[in-house]
């Protein structure tokens, strides 16, 4: 049984994970952390992570970037692995996360979906063929109108996966409105759409002469991210300090 502290338990993802965990015999949420107390849960809820004194095997984080520093401090002090799902981290927070991984296991992924993480591998392999054949690369992501960061962490992860294939030689371009020139070959265009209740939609477009190949992933429910987070928590419990990602989880299945 994997004992979990749900950091951000009363948010939409926190409640989704709570519901799915309740029907999973191999995982139990033993405590939650959230500044909001408008939801009554079957486990104790603390308004900050430093007040949580419940023993656990792993923390799942789906809170706010402003709470990540305190979360990492608590995880290091108590040697509790963290599945870190919050996006929009600052450069300083990313550095702190990497430094903290020397003391405790941390799994960070821009997207917890098993489908998206398989897509990361596929687009990298495709880029090795298409980019060398002169195809242009564009990424279009769509999310609901409440998402505060743009582009999405997943869009950037897809771009990074492609760029790794070419020693990071591609430039990311987010806006061409002020530019009056032909599209350079060594760039990846990244566009963000915000509207309605779109859960998550990512297209990676390889556009060549007279043909276009598009890799697409559509999330119809937040459940895909919740299931991935729970799988990651089971994987991470008991792991040695270090940085992990969803490719490690997939490889263990």
Image (tube, grey):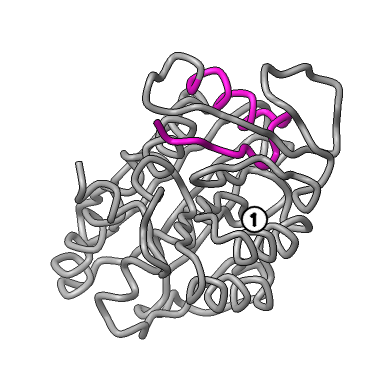
Q: How many marks?
A: 1
Q: Residue at x 58, y 70 (%)?
A: 97
Residue 37 against residue 155 in the figure, above or below: above
Magenta-span inclusion, residue 12: yes
Residue at the (58%, 24%) spot, across then down: 18
Q: Position of residue 165 (x, y in %)?
A: 25, 75
Q: Which residue is mark 1?
A: 150
Q: Residue at x 37, y 26 (%)?
A: 26
User: Image height check: is 141 above or below 126?
Assistant: above
Give the x, y percent position of residue 110: 49, 54
Residue 178 in percent (x, y) is at 68, 74
Query: In the rendered image, which quarter contains the C terminus?
Result: top left
Q: What is the span of residues highlighted in magenta in the rendered image?
A: 1-21
- Quadrant for the N terminus in the image: top left
Q: Secondary structure at mark 1?
A: loop
Q: Quadrant of residue 183?
A: bottom left
Q: Nearer the viewer, residue 137 or 91?
A: 91
Rendering quarter of residue 169? bottom left
- Residue at position x 48%, y 20% in the image: 20
Q: For this view, does 214 lie left or right of residue 183?
A: left
Image coords of residue 161 (percent x, y)? 33, 66
Neighbor class of circle 1 (other Cα within 10 Å; few <14, some 14-19, many 20+) is some
Q: Nearer the viewer, residue 87 or 122?
A: 87
Residue 143 or residue 173, whichever sits in front = 143
Residue 15 falls in which quadrant of the image? top right
């Amino acid at each position: 049984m994997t004992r979990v502290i749900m950091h951000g338990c009363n948010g939409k993802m926190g409640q989704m994970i709570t519901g799915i965990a309740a029907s999973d015999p191999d995982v139990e949420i033993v405590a939650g952390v959230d500044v909001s107390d408008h939801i009554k849960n079957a486990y104790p809820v603390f308004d900050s992570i430093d007040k949580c004194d419940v023993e656990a095997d792993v923390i799942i984080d789906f809170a706010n970037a402003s709470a990540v520093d305190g979360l990492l401090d608590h995880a290091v002090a108590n040697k509790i692995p963290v599945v870190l799902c919050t996006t929009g981290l600052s450069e300083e927070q990313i550095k702190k996360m990497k430094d903290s991984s020397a003391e405790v296991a941390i799994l960070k992924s821009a997207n917890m979906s098993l489908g998206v993480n398989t897509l990361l591998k596929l687009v990298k392999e495709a880029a090795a063929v298409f980019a060398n054949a002169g195809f242009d690369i564009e990424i279009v992501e769509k999310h609901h109108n409440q998402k505060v960061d743009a582009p999405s962490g997943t869009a950037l992860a897809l771009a990074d996966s492609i760029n790794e294939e070419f020693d990071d030689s591609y430039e990311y371009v987010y806006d061409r409105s002020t530019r009056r020139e032909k599209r350079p070959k060594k760039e990846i265009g990244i566009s963000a759409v915000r509207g309605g209740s779109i859960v998550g939609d990512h297209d990676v477009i390889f556009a060549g002469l007279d043909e276009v190949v598009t890799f697409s992933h559509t999330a119809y429910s937040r459940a895909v991210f919740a299931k991935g987070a729970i799988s990651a928590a089971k994987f991470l419990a008991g792991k040695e300090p270090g940085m992990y990602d969803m490719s490690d989880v997939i490889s263990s299945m």
